[in-house]
Image (tube, rainbow, N blue to C red):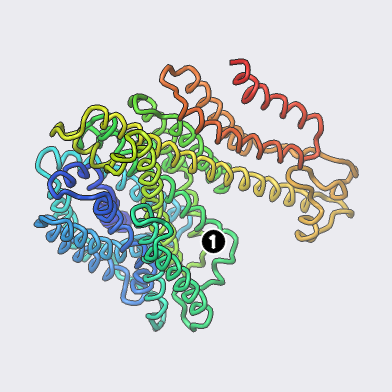
Amino acid sequence: MRRRWAATVVVCLGLFLIGIDFTVLNVAIPDLQRDLRLSTTDVQWIIDGYAVAMSGTVLAAGAVADRIGRRRAFVLGMLLCVVTSVVGGLADTSVQVIAARVGMGLGSALIMPATLSIVTRLFPEPALRRRAIAVWSAVAGVGGLLGPVIGGWLVDRWSWHAGFWVNVPIAVTAVVLALWLVPESRAPGRMSLDLLGAVLSALGLTALVWAVVEGPDRGWTSALVVVAFGSAALLLVLFLLWQVRHRSPMLPLSLLRVPRIGTGLAALALMSFIAFGSFFILVVYLQGVLGYSPWEAGVRTLPMSVAMIAGSAATLPLMSRVGGDTMTLLGFACVTGSFALLATTTADSGYDRLVVFQLVLGVGCGLSLSALTGTVMDAFPAASAGLGSALNDVARQVGMGLGVAVQGSILAAVSSHRLHHLLGRNRGSEDVNAILATSAHGHGGPSAQTVVAAKDAFVTGMARSSVVDAVVLGAVVVVAAVCLIRGRVIRRAETTPSHTIPRSRSVLRRQLPFPFRAPAEARPENRQVVVRLPMPGAWSLALIPLLTASCVLWWRRSARGNERGRVGLAEITLAGRQLVQEMLHAGRSSEIGRRGRRLLHDFLVGRDRRA
């Protein structure tokens, strides 16, 4: 048992290295811009090059790991990270830095799927496996969040080159310990490698992320961006068609039709997309807008790490009582509320509001990511654990890579437009990130008016991106809650002892009014019965309006609230009001509907009109 947990620690050491590499250079962006004179595109590619390479090749790397051996793939990935880290540590041009980041992404693509596969093979017992997966999920999230802290200390003490050199001793230690403690494992039998599928998936995902990254700079309707989007769509469609025809597909599409696997992977990708994509924006805000040094900015992201550890630790005891679905819903609701709060942030809001944002976001991520990972892995048979690990990693890494790219692109587009509006047509082409980086180091250059305009433009882009995140997640929470409640109603109706109960689940679904009322014919007393939710489910649903109301009250009492925050909050409350009203109408409960609509109207509309 001790040897198994020791092997888990070694594997998590490599996973921690991947998380550090994902964000270690985020706090070094101002120093990189000053030393290498980087453009916004260069900055995005230094950050996104790692994510693009990892997201594009992790599926193929997972298939390779199953065939050549998971420990061997882990060791090869670590050695590749060592070589590319040395290249990055010696780099003095943007091209060399980007090349090093891409190489590190390729190495991480080999490491990531091997780690979870090794963990699941080490612990075939369900209880121990869930505990090990919770540890794995916590390390996967915390590693990325601690990257800015480590990177900030390295940049302040030495330079941005140290962000590459720190990988070397960690990777070498992990290689030595893995060869000693980690047992080798591979897929049973001799399976052919789907080389064409690997190439199609890598090219398709790479083209997609490239188009998203380059869209704001080149224009979304430019020829290259349109061709990249078209190529990505064509390549991914060809990849799916090839998977249907191949005897040993890299991605068996039949597994994705299993509800828990398909929806679980989609939820993992969405959570990684929103949570980790916004982290890049948060670090730039701390340095460029609030004026913290790289080290200070990194330290001020620690609340999210602590909250994520707490959320992951609470997953195991809570899942045994309320189930993984409710835990996932609760986590998504927390993340929704955190972005509703971030949407009201201004250039002079200070750090206090970000502490609350990080705590709520960290708890939500810890709850949802651990629960989702365990749910997805439990849905796979033991013989397909390696495939489940690879698909889990694909969902996480594609979500993280696209999240950084998409949210960075939204930020760049909105902030550039805002800066153009504030400074005028002749000066609006200045780069927002470059202005903030220069002002943070106090090297002169832009005037005070330009710096203020750049901060305003950046916060506008951050608020707009947060509004999008909150609305999307809020819609997902509502839909997921409705589906969860309907499923419980169906299960209760099936188990009710009555000769009038239709035993077919499809019949029950057709007869079940949307979303909450139980079918009258499925009850012995032949009358409408209001289904009462268990308290954990009710807490999950109640958390949405409670968090939103807290954000509203905080914003109303803040003397720093401005028109931008008011517009962003109005968009969120409008979408939430429409969804709740539709649910009340669909429930066919007129009295509840009238009271609910009157309450929503008085709270969300009436007070604004009186003001």
Tell me the quadrant of the picture where the C terminus can be found.
top right
Q: Seen in the image, is 76 located left or right of residue 309?
A: left
Q: Secondary structure at mark 1?
A: helix
Residue 509, placed above or below residue 426: below
Image point (30%, 70%), residue name: 184
Q: Position of residue 150 (x, y in %)?
A: 21, 42
* 497 to the left or right of 4: right
183 relative to 89, above or below: below
**Quadrant where the N terminus is found in the figure:** bottom left
At label 1, which amino acid type do we have? Ile
Q: Position of residue 605 (x, y in %)?
A: 63, 24
Which residue matches tag 1? 261
Pick the front one: 554 or 81: 554
Q: What x and y, as percent, mark residue 133?
A: 41, 53
Please tell me whether residue 60 is drawn above or below residue 530 in the rendered image.
below
Q: Residue at x 25, y 65 (%)?
A: 77
Looking at the image, how many numbered discs can be counted on the residues? Answer: 1
